[in-house]
Image (cartoon, rainbow, N blue to C red):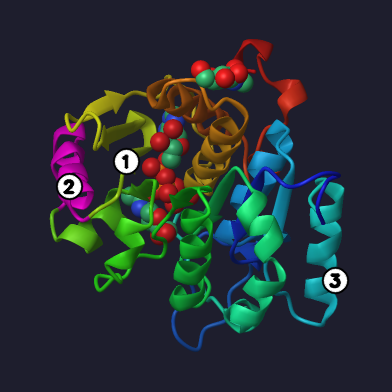
Amino acid sequence: MAAAGPAEVVVVGSCMTDLVSLTTRLPKAGETIHGHKFFIGFGGKGANQCIQAARLGAKTLMICKVGKDSFGNDYIENFKRNGISTGQNVIVIVAGANLLLDSEDLKRAANAICKAKVIICQLEITPAISLEALKMAYSNGVKTLFNPAPAHAELDPQFYTHSDIFCCNESEAEILTGIPVGSPEDAGKVGLMLLERGCKLVIVTLGAEGCVMISVDEPIPKHVPAGKVRAVDTTGAGDSFVGALAFFMACYPNLSMEELIRKSNFIASVSVQASGTQSSYPYRKDLPQELF
Ligand SMILES: Nc1ncnc2c1ncn2[C@@H]1O[C@H](COP(=O)(O)OP(=O)(O)OP(=O)(O)O)[C@@H](O)[C@H]1O
Ligand SMILES: *[C@@H]1O[C@H](CO)[C@@H](O)[C@H](O)[C@H]1NC(C)=O
Ligand SMILES: *[C@@H]1O[C@H](CO)[C@@H](O)[C@H](O)[C@H]1NC(C)=O
């Protein structure tokens, strides 16, 4: 699944197949209602992030497990096609094969992990495996980008000490700190709390408000706003942001973090202007070339 040469962005994470049906309301227990649309989408946080980084032009590698069935086969095809070696809803997740990714798999991929420029990890796989991957990368000087999603209140403290960048959204920040986040000021407060747990830089994303960053080097919160756009579907915006950030970190190591975040806000704000998750993620060729 990798492009030629060592991968710049390695993602250890999840693949999910979304079976989506649109209805005017949710069915009650035991009730059957008609949906007006049905489609199958490719999702899973790790895969989404990897797809966005690849569409911007990063050499990417995805470390994941899929089932030995038609959904698994279709997912592999989706990665190949991408050049990789709103409303109320109810979601049922069957983690399935994602939880089977284990230490042996990481050892087999150790070479790629240690040669990457950036690694992305999240929590849709077994947390201990995510942490192990993060540690492998961190001890080899690979920049680690950790997205604590879905959030657990009892996050192993080593996730903080092995994150160069710790990137969460408002609700995840609240689960981790117990403090509700509703404004850039709140985000600055929780950002500082998370920073004190040992990460080098914290980003709290704030939807249409963009995000707030705070770093060990400059422990004063900085609000980086997103541009005003007409949002049609914000699903997967967070993963677009994380994937874009990994791409920019890997390919533009000399730009300031604020500049990298500004560019990533722009990419994610493009993704909210189209419907779907991966289907809304922009390709480099369709973006203003001054971004690159
Ligand atoms: N309405 C919007 N207008 C402009 N940019 C947006 C909008 N919503 C999201 N974004 C961009 O996407 C980034 C991530 O959004 P958000 O904080 O909603 O992530 P999230 O909650 O993880 O997303 P998800 O809907 O996938 O769970 C923001 O930091 C911003 O750059
Ligand atoms: C934050 O991300 C999680 C997925 O990890 C999502 O369920 C939640 O709705 C998001 N929160 C906000 C405020 O967008
Ligand atoms: C980044 O900066 C370093 C040190 O200043 C320099 O050696 C390197 O060539 C620069 N890289 C790029 C891609 O500009």
Q: Quadrant of residue 108?
A: bottom right
Magenta residue span: 180-197
Residue marked by disc 1: 201
Across and down, in percent, residue 33 comes to: 58, 74
Q: Residue at x 84, y 66 (%)?
A: 74
**Most common SS among magenta residues:** helix
Residue 208 visible, this orientation: yes
Q: Residue at x 68, y 20 (%)?
A: 287
The quarter in which the C terminus is drawn is: top right
Q: Which three-letter amino acid code belongs to the residue tagged 1?
A: Leu
Nearer to us: label 1 or label 3: 1
Left or right of residue 125: residue 78: right
Compared with residue 208, is residue 69 higher up or lower down, i.e. above or below?
below
Q: Residue at x 38, y 52 (%)?
A: 163
Residue marked by disc 3: 73
The quarter in which the N terminus is drawn is: bottom right
Compared with residue 232, is residue 259 higher up or lower down, i.e. above or below?
above
Tag 3 and tag 2, C-beta contact below 8 Å:
no
Residue marked by disc 2: 190
Q: Which three-letter amino acid code belongs to the residue tagged 2?
A: Val
Q: Earlier in the sequence, mark 1 or mark 3?
A: 3
- CA gap between label 1 and label 3 equals 37 Å
Ligand 3 falls in which quarter?
A: top right
- CA gap between label 1 and label 2 equals 12 Å
Left or right of residue 21: residue 263: left
Q: Residues within 10 Å of mark 3 (few under 14, many from 20)?
A: few
Tag 1 and tag 2, C-beta contact below 8 Å:
no
What is the secondary structure assignment of the residue under circle 2? helix
